[in-house]
Image (spheres, rainbow, N blue to C red):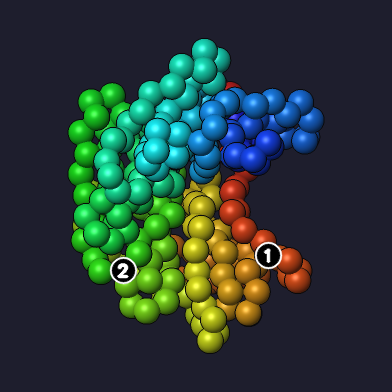
Amino acid sequence: PNGDTVAYAKNEGGNFDIWLMNNDGYDARRLTIDPGDDLSPSWSPDGRRIAFHSTRDGNTDIYVIAVQSRHEVRLTQNLGVDVEPAWSPDGRLIAFASDRNGSFDLYLIDVEVGSKSQLTHRVGVDTSPAWSPDGMQLVFSSNRDGRFRLYLMTRHGAEERLIPIKPEGPMSADSSPAWSPDGRYIAFVSERDYNPEVYVTDPEGTYLSRLTSHPSEDTAPAFKPQPARRP
């Protein structure tokens, strides 16, 4: 959360584990060691824990690992596929995507209590939840209307609305949203120009800027955290 360390998934030896490295690209070290695949790392706001999803117990579930002690806790145990954990800014909740009820919807889990609630109830795939910096909203990607677009809702799953990003292209599949630390912008991946590139919009969809332009696929944008202000 302070921007000094990057968490990422790396395949070394035939399976994915969670790794850490300094933000200058040096001092890479493995955090998880398991024959299953560990993916989608998400830092807790205090930097002490990382949530991730894993296939280690024969099913895809959400886990949390303490960075220093490496103590691991399994948060979900369901026959469905639970993926893409995202910590709330206050550290109390984790949003995630799951197909436990037949189609991919978004859910919340209270990290300490373990209680879960379903946020979305639509036919289609709702995925990639990301919290607004104030913790009041979630942005996510959904193909509920036929193609993947970005949507907003409250932290309680109410007031769902499409972000009407214009212009659209024939391949406007929008995914992997990430809020800027000040809440003014949302970075995302789009194929609106026929190749996965990184774009930035605002929560109302009135602004659009393309940040990358390369024949290779550009994915998984993430803003660098703002440094803490000194009193």
Q: Where is the C terminus found, in terms of image quarters?
A: top right
Q: Looking at the image, which residue is at 60% across and 39% down?
A: 15
Determine contact: label 2, label 1, CB under 8 Å: no
- The secondary structure type at the circle numbered 2 is loop
- Counting from the top left corner in percent of width and height, residue 192 is at 57, 78
Q: In this rendering, would 225 be left or right of 52?
A: right
Q: Position of residue 90 (x, y in %)?
A: 37, 32
**Left or right position of 105 against 180:** left
Res 217 label: 1
Q: Position of residue 85 (x, y in %)?
A: 41, 42
Which of pointers 2 and 1 lies earlier in the amino acid sequence? 2
**Residue shown at 39% from the left, 57% from the top:** 127
Three-letter code for the amino acid on which mark 1 is drawn: Glu
* Image height of 169 relative to 186, above or below: below
Q: Which mark is residue 124?
A: 2
The quarter of the picture where residue 213 lies is bottom right
Q: Is residue 30 above or below residue 82?
A: above
Q: Quadrant of the N terminus?
A: top right
Task: Give the farthest residue toward the bottom.
Answer: 170
**Residue at the image position 43 percent from the left and 28 percent from the top:** 64
**Residue 159 makes an appearance in the image:** no
Query: What label does residue 164 carry, if any?
Result: none
